[in-house]
Amino acid sequence: MTIQESSPEINMNGSTNPGLASVIKPIAWMVLGGAIIVAIAFVAGVLPPHNDHVVATDVADTEFWTCGMHPEVIEEEPGTCPICHMNLTPLNSNPPQAEHGEAAKELWACPMHPEVLETEPGACPICKMDLVPVELQGLDTEGSNHHGTVVTIDPVVVQNMNVRTQPGHRRDLSRSIRTVGHLDYDQERMVSVTTRYAGFIEKVFVNHVGQPVAKGEPLFEVYSPELVQTQQELLSAVEYARRMSAADPDTQRRANSLVSSARQRLSYWDVTADQVTEIETSGRVLRTLTVVSPLTGVVMQRMHGLEGMAIRPGMEALHVADLSSLWLTVEIYEDQLPWLGEDSTANVSFDYLPGEQFSGRVRYVEPEVSPSTRTVKLTLQVPNRDRRLRVGMYATVVFKPVVARNAVVIPAQAVIRSGERDIVVVALGGGRFAPREVTLGVQSDGLIQVIEGLDGTEEIVTSAQFLIDSESNLRAAVEKMISAKRGHQH
C-alpha cells in the first residue's frame, strides 16, 4: 500500500504524478549546477587573465603628489616633502595611456607656474590664472643631440612667458681686459748732452727747463784748448796738402792722410761736419765750438750756473727728451698673459681728455711676476704728436685680444648654471623646446663660447628658459616614475 503511494505514475492525459515530481526536481538542480561549474572551469582554462591591462589601468588612474619647490619629489600618497617639509600637492600629470595608437590626451598648465599640471581645464591654485593646454611628450627620441624631455608649448603660452630666442653663430670671440697705468718718458727718445773734452762753457742758449729745442739748434758754446790745437793741426794739414798737390802720388797720399786724421779727431769730439767745413773754408781757428741738440724735444734737466762753468768729459750739462712718443706702464694678472704680448694693441683714454681715444702698442713685457700682487708689468708706446699728453698722467687701458677663433658663441644669459652642469634650451620649431647640456669656454662682453653641445646652427632660448627647463625636468621625472611603476607591476 505504501509503495504504491510513493511511486510516480503518469495519467493518460499526460499529467505527472505528484509523487514522481518530488523525486526528479532535486536531481535536475544537481545536474544543472554541475554543468555551470564545468562551463566556468572551461572558460577559465581557455581564456588567459588580462592582468596586465588591469594593472596598467590601476597605475594610470593613480594620483601622484609632488612638492611645489622640489618637482623631483613625487609620491603616491599625500604628505610632506622630505626636503623642505612643505605639504605635497596633487599632480595629475599622467593621463590614461592611449590604446591602439590613439593620440595622447592634453595636460593643462599654468603659464606662470609650470609645476601646476592638471588633466582638466580650470584655474591655477596658486595665481588663479586660467590653465592652458600643454601636450605631454614622451622622452626624447629624436637623437642623441637632445639631453632632456622635449616640451611642446602652446603659442599663447609662449607669448605669455615672454620666450625670446636668438640664433647661435660662429665668430672670433674677443675678451676685454681693462687696467690702468701712468705715462712716463720714452726711454728710447731721451739724450744726455755732454762733451768729450775738457773746457769752459762761455755762452748758453737754453735758459730754462721745459724749453723746446729742435734738432741741430745751438745749446751752448765751449772753449777748449784741445779743440783749438786740433783745429790748428787741421788747417796745417790742409795747407800742406795744397802745396803737395803737384808732387808725386805717394807724397800726395801722405799729405791727404794728415788731413783725414785731423778731421777724424774732430769728429770723435762731436764736432759736426758743417763745423769742420767752416774751419777749412775760413782758414781760421774757431775759439769756441757750439754744441747743438741731437734731437727735437724739450729740455728736461739743466745744470744750475751752467754759463762759465768748467766742464769735464762725460759731465751732463743738459737732458733733452723727445715727447712725440711716451711710454705707458700698466699691470695685468698672470692669467691674462696668454692673450697679450709684444705688439699687442690697446685703446687708451684719459680723464684729462674726455671722449678721445689713443692707441698704444706693447713694447716690452717684464720677465717676472710680482710675488705680492701676482701681476706683470707691460710697457706701451703711445703717440703724442700734438704734445697734449704729459708725463705722470693716469690712463685707462682696454685690451681686446682674440681669445677664440671661429667659435660657437651664444648669449651668456641663455645658460642655466646648476653648479654641476650647464644647460641651454634649444627651440626646435613648432612650439617645441629641448634642454641641452653644453661645455662652456671663455666669456666676454655678454657672450660665451660653447666648446661642446652646439654646432652654431641652433635657435637658442634667451628668455624664460628657466621655466621651460623646469617643465622639462618635471615631466621627465614623472615619466620615469610612471615607467618604473609599470615595470614593477609587470
Image (cartoon, rainbow, N blue to C red):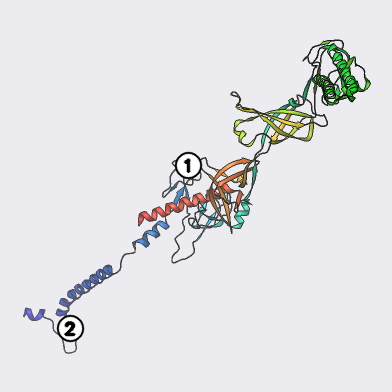
Left or right, 261 with respect to 178, comes to: right
| Callout 2 crowding tier (Cα within 10 Å): few <14, some 14–19, many ≥20 | few
Query: For the residue marked with disc 2, what is the amino acid?
Result: Thr
Residue 221 can be seen in this image: no
Query: For the residue marked with disc 1, what is the amino acid?
Result: Met
Q: Where is residue 354 in the image (x, y as percent from the top left)?
A: 79, 33
Find residue 50 and report its image quarter.
bottom left
Residue 352 can be seen in this image: yes
Q: Nearer the viewer, residue 71 or 331?
A: 331
Give the distance between the C-alpha atoms of the residues marked 1 and 2, in whole angstroms.
80 Å
Vertically, is 19 above or below 440? Answer: below
**Please, what secondary structure does the residue beneath circle 2 have?**
loop
Return the residue found at the far left: 1
- The residue singled out by tag 1 in the image is 86
Total labels drawn = 2
Vertically, is 202 above or below 8? Answer: above
Q: Nearer the viewer, residue 158 or 272?
A: 272
Q: Position of residue 195 (x, y in %)?
A: 80, 16
Left or right, 390 with respect to 275, comes to: left
Left or right, 209 with respect to 62, comes to: right
- The residue singled out by tag 2 in the image is 16
Q: Are marks 1 and 2 in contact (CB under 8 Å)?
A: no
Q: Nearer the viewer, residue 454 or 28?
A: 454
| Residue in the picture at 52% in, 40% down | 419
Q: Position of residue 258 (x, y in %)?
A: 83, 20
| Residue in the picture at 61% in, 36% down | 338
User: In which quadrant is the C terminus drawn?
Assistant: bottom left
Q: Which of 169 and 371 is in front in this view?
A: 371
